Image (cartoon, rainbow, N blue to C red):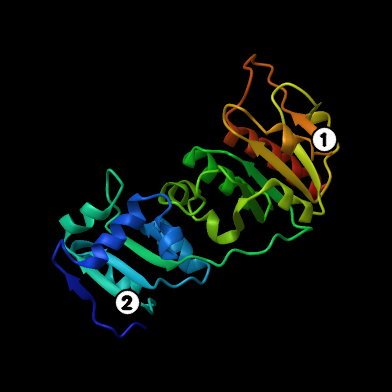
Amino acid sequence: MNTQQPQLISSAANPLLKDLRRLAQDSTAYRKQGRIWLEGDHLCSAALARGLQPAIAVFSESAWQAQASRWTTLRGRIVLLADALFGSISALESPGYMGFVVELPAAPAIAPAAPTVILDRVQDAGNVGSILRSAAAFGFGQVIAIKGTAALWSPKVLRAGMGAHFALSLIEGVDIPDLERLDVTLLATSSHRGEFLHEAKLPWPCGWMLGHEGQGVSPELEARAAHSVRIAQPGGEESLNVAAAAAICLHASACTRLG
C-alpha cells in the first residue's frame, strides 16, 4: 500500500507539467525522456496487470476523490492536478483525468526463433496499434519496426494498442540488414501477387512482413521473403487496410499452429 501523501500541483508553470505535456502530445518525446505516458483507466490498469508500476501516477482532483480507494497498490509518487490543468496536458478530446508515467522498457535484442511481425514504414498510429493488438492476440510476441514506421511507444499508438504493448517484445528503429538475425520463414503480404492465403501452407513459427499503407512492402524487404501471400477479395476491392490484412494473416497463422 502506498503511504505517501499525494502532491497537489496548482501552478501551470510547474516543470512537471511541461514534461507531462511533451510526453502526452509529442510522439517521440518518450525517446528523449526515457518514459512513456499512459492516459486513462484502461491503459493504466493493463500496465498494472502486467506488473508494471508507474514512476508517477497523475490524477485530476475529481478523479482522485472519486477513485482513490481503487489505487491503493500504487508504490510510486502520486500527483494531483486541478481538472483544468489535467486537461491542458492531455491530447484527448475527452481527457482521461488519470495517467501513469512509466519507465520506457529497455529495447530487447531480436529473438531469432520468435514468431514475429515486421512493420515496414507503416505510418498511421491507429494501424500500428491495431496490428500490435492482433500480434498479441494471435501469438506473435515479437514486433520489429523498420525505420520509418510510426513510433511504437507514442501516445497515439499506445491508445490504439489498448494494452497490447505490455504483452509484446517491441524493437523499433531497425535497419533491414538487421533482419539477418531472424531464423524464421519470412512471409510478405502483397495485394496483387503470390499465393492466396487460404491456399497457402503456412509455416510456424514465421515472420509476417507488413508494408507502408500506400507502397506496401519495399522491394528490398520483399526480396528477403520466402513467400509472397495475398488475400482473396471476392468483393472486388483492390486492397485491404494494412491493419485488417494483418489481422487476417496472423489469424490464419494461429489456426495453422492450432492444427
Q: Quadrant of residue 118?
A: top right
Q: Quadrant of residue 134?
A: top right
Say which mark, if any, is on residue 227: 1
Q: Position of residue 156 (x, y in %)?
A: 42, 47
Q: Is residue 75 above or below residue 181?
A: below
Give the left or right position of residue 90, taking residue 204 as reference.
Answer: left
Q: Is residue 197 above or below residue 119?
A: above
- Residue furthest bottom as drawn: 3
Please tell me which residue is depicted at 70% across the width and 46% down the height of the picture: 176
Please tell me which residue is depicted at 15% across the width and 61% down the height of the picture: 12
Q: Nearer the viewer, residue 218 or 193?
A: 218
Give the left or right position of residue 253, taking residue 162 as reference.
Answer: right
Q: Position of residue 97 (x, y in %)?
A: 27, 57
Residue 64 visible somewhere in the drawing? no
Q: Nearer the viewer, residue 54 or 123?
A: 123
Q: Position of residue 22 (x, y in %)?
A: 32, 56
Q: Is residue 63 above or below residue 94?
A: below
Q: Quadrant of the N terminus?
A: bottom left
Give the left or right position of residue 248, taking residue 224 as reference.
Answer: left
Dot 2, crowdedness within 10 Å: few (<14), some or many (≥20)? Answer: some
Please tell me which residue is depicted at 48% across the width and 54% down the height of the picture: 153
Q: Secondary structure at mark 2?
A: strand
Which of marks 2 and 1 precedes in the sequence? 2
Q: CA distance from mark 1 to mark 2?
A: 51 Å
Dot 1, crowdedness within 10 Å: few (<14), some or many (≥20)? Answer: some
Q: Secondary structure at mark 1?
A: strand
Three-letter code, disc 1? His
Please tell me which residue is depicted at 57% across the width and 48% down the height of the picture: 132
Three-letter code, disc 2? Arg
Q: What residue sits right under mark 2 in the picture?
A: 77
